[in-house]
Image (cartoon, rainbow, N blue to C red):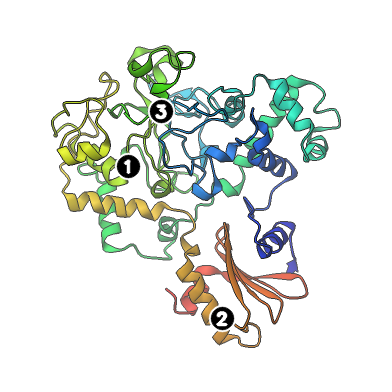
Amino acid sequence: MKSLPLYLCTWVCLSALGLSVATAAPLTPLQDLGRQLFLDPQLSSPAGESCSSCHSPTAAFTDPRRDTPTSPGAIAGRFGNRNSPTAMYAALSPLFQLDSDGVTYEGGLFWDGRAANLEQQAQGPLLNPLEMANPDKATVVNKVRAASYAPLFKSVFGPTALNQTEPAYAMIASAIAAFERSPTFSPFSSKYDAYLAGQVQLTAAEEHGRTLFNDPTKGNCAACHPSTPSADGTPPLFTDFTYDNLGVPRNPNNPFYNLPAAFNPAGLNFLDLGLGPIVGNTGDNGKFKVPTLRNIALTNPYMHNGYFQTLLGVVDFYNTRDVKPACPDPMTTENLALAQGCWPQPETPANVNHKELGNLQLSGSDENDIVAFLGTLTDGYWQTPALSECLFNWAEGAYPGLFQPAGSVTQSQAPYTYRYYKAANAYLGVSSDDNHVYYLGSNGVMQDVGALPTWLKKAGCI
């Protein structure tokens, strides 16, 4: 038994009031400052665009706006040229570097690796005219000086932290990076994590998909998306952090093509060369960073330009890219390509990886099973409404003195689901941060009553 920590008080109090909280994980002052910066829509010019606009906690930290493959910026009519990747697990990417083989690049942030680390990455969108569109660093720092969290900024970095633009701007990025390194972004709470821990079994389709995923003679997905824990015990990240040209077609729905010449001089002829220009080597043209597959079922559209809307389309492309004929129109959408039984030519035909994908000889059933397996990589597995409801309903029967259903209310505020019992002024909740069950009584003292899987089994829910 222990006193109610501040972060659980935030969960209980704000959720009971119907207010949304971006994270319920315990944060250091530096991380909490980063959280407030990350969520602040005043940090764009004009105001209205925050980091979370394109990396929302409600969409696995990707852009929740699915009506366009690339994200709109703060200024109406402007769009980025690339799909917003998930910020989840980004903190575990190594620094951008050349591998020991002297040929392969790995690590870094952005699709092209142009930021070596999270601190460098956080500085980019604030000044990008297609994103948050601030004209200079001083504008950003001035906004922070006027923010409600300015006192916290000075408490964390010192009373003179906002006096000078350059160091203050670096501190802003440092705080955002610290937030992105918090457990909120790397919960490792998927069904697959539960499977690795021996807590659940996969369905027949999921297990077959896992086998195909790992088999070098079948899906061969694990060649770039390793599915086993690392040597130091870190759960699998489902990326090797390298760069590859998969032969992805141009996306005719990319609004960047239609931007004015000031932002896109090539117009419809624009080609995204990815890593090549960053490292000054044409042999790396068309290569983009291998993304994590964690939460992949939630993070469409897929690929650097958002060409694919469906996971099944991605898997079919990997399977048949080199088998199906080329579509007559190089600007054919995924839906039309699947209907016509063709694939458009690659955006960058040179350097396409033909060794590991393109003709996997998988059946349609095999493709569906791989997609089923990918669905097990979604975080918050134990937090499904059905499991929570089952547990809460069982608790009311097992402990009628504590949990009286009359007047009770069930609510969810990621990463928590809880039921409030009005008569007893008590809460019973489950946390996806640690997959434990918590009881909070009217005395304000919170008890960790044990592991969620254990209670679900006891309740007969699994």
Q: Which mark is residue 255?
A: 3
- The quadrant holding residue 415 is bottom right
Mark 3 or 2, closer to the camera:
3
Work out whether mark 1 precedes mark 3 in sequence or the reverse, and give the earlier one: 1
Element on which disc 2 rests:
helix
Q: Which residue is nearer to you in this view: 107 or 406?
A: 406
Q: Which residue is nearer to you in this view: 232 or 269?
A: 269
Residue 354 lies, with reference to residue 181, above or below; the image says: above
Element on which disc 3 rests:
helix
Q: CA distance from mark 1 to mark 3?
A: 33 Å
Instruction: Answer few, some or many: residues within 10 Å of disc 2's Cα (few below 14, many 20 plus, some between 14 and 19).
Output: some
Which residue bears the numbered disc 2?
Answer: 395
Q: Which residue is nearer to you in this view: 359 or 211?
A: 359
- The quadrant holding residue 430 is bottom right
Residue type of the residue flagged with mark 1: Ala
Which residue bears the numbered disc 1?
Answer: 222
Question: What residue is at 79 percent from the left and 40 percent from the top?
Answer: 152
Work out whether mark 2 precedes mark 1 in sequence or the reverse, and give the earlier one: 1
Residue type of the residue flagged with mark 2: Ala
- The picture places residue 231, in percent across and down from the top left corner, at 46, 44
Residue type of the residue flagged with mark 3: Pro
Question: What residue is at 24 percent from the left and 31 percent from the top?
Answer: 332
Instruction: Answer few, some or many: residues within 10 Å of disc 3's Cα (few below 14, many 20 plus, some between 14 and 19).
Output: some
Q: Which residue is nearer to you in this view: 355 or 296?
A: 296
- The picture places residue 434, in percent across and down from the top left corner, at 57, 59
